[in-house]
Each structure stands twice: as structure tokens, then as C-alpha cells.
Image (cartoon, helix red, strand yellow):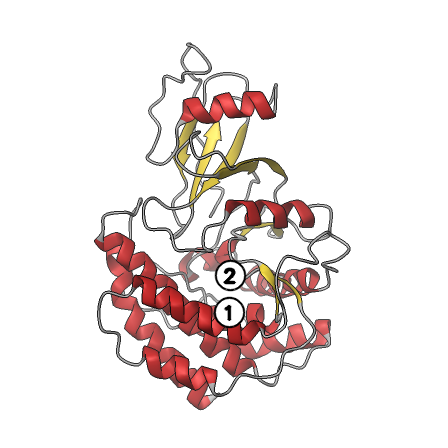
């Protein structure tokens, strides 16, 4: 998710409960306005308009505005929704818990579990200004010094997250950290089975190799679950203003977050890929430096990080296959979904190579 380009202009006059602006698929502006008027009286002043924020490949994110103020609305994807995935209440709970800490997250404003309002559960949060950096070309505009500082700040922000005491912020029951890695492997295997409608050579071998080499976990922490550069917003001062997309957050092995960050850092630039990679930007630190920074700041043993990076390739392959499956059913909104399916075999290959070469 990104801050995107907010809706502009002044709303047309009319009944504020029945906006005159057409809404993108997946959001009923009249229902959302009526709900916010009940739950947060005075928050909205005028008819709402909405714009889909491009970039996300899972939950749908919209910038909504009354012409004066703006907010962000999150809801699950249209159609095919896997069990335990796309839980709006979990996202809302974790950002509510983290908002008072040193972890930069948007202020949560309202959670709606009534599907009759706009067709699914959703929540509304503060709109945070900032840019998500998704490509080496985009990041290169910052210059080598700022690029290096930003990536190190990304690691430091992860360390900050992993220092939060789950009990102190009300998240003691947010997950089951015992046996976390084994359960993750089983869970993503089930997710793959639920979305798989074609042969994927190597993916079963990757899962089996990961299963037979599970490393011992350090003490559990709050996990983001999808921690990477384009899931944070960067402000005009080139510092991180918000960490976004908490849909995979839980309690578990903190090195899972680091492994995913390493995977995105090491990921090759696949041809015509809609997935983000910034590794080619001048000044971008190598994965080894990011790992060393995390180890120094956190005090954790990172000697098994290759396993975590390979697992991250496996997880991303499963996620991409699920998105590809929804695309084949015509249940995606936005651009770039037609290229997702071709990336899955490449992700599997990279996972196998990472696990073999360490």
C-alpha cells in the first residue's frame, strides 16, 4: 500500500449520505459514510469520494476524501478469500497496539465487521504522507547517501518492532509462537493447495527441504510478516513515516521478518516483474550489511539466515500463485496481475538455490 495520489477537487453538492461521485469496485461510499457518521460523528464533512491505491497485490486499499480531509480504507480482495487470510480485525488490532510505541504506524480510526456496509469487513485509518519506493530507478533519485541511510533505517525500524513487549501492548495472545516455523510451513502448504490449479515444478521439493532443516527459533516477538521497503512510506526528509500492510502480522520468530527483507534485497530483477526490487540502486547496501546491522542492533544470532530467506522465497511463491489464481477467475482489481503467474517458477528456483548455497 502507498499514500498514492489522493482524490482531488471539491465534492459536488448533495446528500452527504449519498455521494454523487462514482466509487471504484469494492467500496460503497454511501454505506461507508453512514457508518463513519455513526461511529465517528463529525469526522467526515461532505460527500465522500474514493480512489484505489495501486501497488498492493492482496488486500485492497483506497484513499477516501471529503474534499478537505483524507483517510485510508482497507478491505479484503474481491472474491476468492482463503481461510485465516485478509483478517481486517487483526490488522486493526496490531496497528492500534503499536501506535503508542516507537514503531511508526498510521493512527487507526474505525473498524467495521458488518459486511452489509460495503460487502466485507474494513477499517479506516489516518492518511500518512509519504512515498513507497518500489524500484531501483525510483530509489536512485534519492542519491547513494540517502539510499544507504534509508535502507539502514529500514533495518533499525525492524529492530524497534522486535523490541516491543507483546504483553505490554496487549498482544500477548496475538499468536502462538511455540512451533511457529513448523506451523508456517504447514500453513503455506495449505494455502498453496487451496490456490493451486497448475503444475509448479520444484515447489514441493523446496517445501520438503525447508521442513527437514528448520532452525531453532530465538525468543518470539511481534512480527510484521511482509517487511520490505515498499511496505513503508518515506517522508520528504527521507525518513520512514509509516510501516504499512500488517495483514500477516503475528507473534513468532523475528528472523522471519529479516529473512524476508534479505530475500527482497537479494531478489533478481525478473523481466517485466510487478514485484518490487531496489537492489540495483546506487548506495543500496548488500544483504550481508543489512544482516550484520540487524545482528548488532538486536543481539540475535543470524547464522541460519539462509533458511529464512529461502522460506521467504517459498512464501512469496505461494502468495503470487494465489494472486495468479484470483486473476484467472477475474477477481483482481488493478494492473500487473497478468504477469504474476510467470514469476512463481522463478521464485521457487531462487528458494532452492538460496537453501543450497546458503
Foreground residue, 6 or 108?
Answer: 108
List the residue tagged with mark 2: 226
* 112 vs 56: above or below: above
Residue lying at the far right in this picture: please name it: 168
How many marks can you see? 2
Res 150 visible: yes
Helix, strand, or loop for circle 2? Answer: loop
- The answer to whether 241 appears left or right of 134 in the picture is right
The residue drawn where x is 61% and y is 43% is 106
- The answer to whether 165 appears left or right of 55 in the picture is right
* Label number found at residue 127: none
The residue drawn where x is 55% and y is 45% is 89
Return the x and y of residue 30 as percentages of the image width and height.
Answer: 42, 22
Foreground residue, 42 or 353?
Answer: 42
Return the x and y of residue 205 as percentages of the image width and height.
Answer: 35, 84
List the residue tagged with mark 1: 260
Helix, strand, or loop for circle 1? Answer: helix
User: Residue 188: which quarter of the image?
Assistant: bottom left
Q: Earlier in the sequence, mark 2 or mark 1?
A: 2
Foreground residue, 230 or 318?
Answer: 318
Amino acid at each position: 500500500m502507498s499514500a498514492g495520489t489522493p482524490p482531488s477537487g471539491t465534492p459536488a453538492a448533495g446528500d452527504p449520505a449519498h455521494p454523487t461521485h462514482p466509487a471504484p469496485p469494492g467500496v460503497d461510499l454511501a454505506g461507508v459514510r453512514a457508518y463513519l457518521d455513526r461511529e465517528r460523528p463529525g469526522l467526515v464533512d461532505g460527500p465522500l469520494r474514493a480512489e484505489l491505491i495501486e501497488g498492493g497485490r492482496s488486500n485492497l486499499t483506497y484513499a477516501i476524501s471529503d474534499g478537505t480531509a483524507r483517510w485510508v480504507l482497507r478491505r479484503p480482495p474481491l472474491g476468492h478469500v482463503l481461510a485465516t487470510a485478509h483478517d481486517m480485525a487483526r490488522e486493526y488490532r496490531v496497528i492500534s497496539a503499536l501506535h503508542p510505541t516507537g514503531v511508526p504506524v498510521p493512527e487507526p480510526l474505525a473498524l467495521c465487521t458488518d459486511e452489509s456496509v460495503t460487502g466485507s469487513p474494513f477499517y479506516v485509518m489516518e492518511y500518512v504522507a509519504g512515498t513507497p519506493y518500489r524500484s531501483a530507478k525510483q530509489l536512485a533519485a534519492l542519491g547513494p547517501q540517502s539510499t544507504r541511510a534509508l535502507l539502514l533505517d529500514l533495518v533499525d525500524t525492524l529492530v524497534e518492532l522486535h523490541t516491543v513487549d507483546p504483553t505490554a501492548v496487549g498482544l500477548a495472545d496475538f499468536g502462538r509462537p511455540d512451533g511457529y516455523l513448523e506451523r508456517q510451513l504447514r500453513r503455506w502448504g495449505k494455502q498453496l493447495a487451496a490456490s493451486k490449479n497448475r503444475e509448479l515444478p520444484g515447489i514441493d521439493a523446496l517445501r520438503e527441504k525447508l521442513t527437514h532443516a528448520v532452525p531453532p527459533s530465538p525468543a518470539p516477538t511481534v512480527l510484521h510478516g511482509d517487511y520490505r521497503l515498499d511496505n513503508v512510506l518515506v517522508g520528504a526528509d527521507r525518513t520512514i513515516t509509516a510501516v504499512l500492510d500488517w495483514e500477516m502480522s503475528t507473534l513468532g520468530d523475528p528472523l522471519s521478518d529479516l529473512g524476508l527483507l534479505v530475500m527482497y534485497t537479494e531478489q533478481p530483477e525478473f523481466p517485466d516483474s510487478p514485484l518490487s526490487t531496489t537492489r540495483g540502486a546506487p548506495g543500496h547496501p548488500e544483504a550481508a550489511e543489512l544482516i550484520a546491522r540487524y545482528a548488532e542492533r538486536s543481539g540475535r544470532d543470524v547464522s541460519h539466515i539462509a533458511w529464512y530467506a529461502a522460506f521467504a522465497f517459498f512464501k512469496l511463491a505461494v502468495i503470487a500463485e494465489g494472486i495468479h489464481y484470483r486473476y484467472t477467475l477475474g477477481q483482481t482489481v488493478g494492473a500487473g496481475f497478468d504477469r504474476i503467474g510467470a514469476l512463481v517458477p522463478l521464485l521457487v528456483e531462487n528458494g532452492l538455490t538460496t537453501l543450497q548455497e546458503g
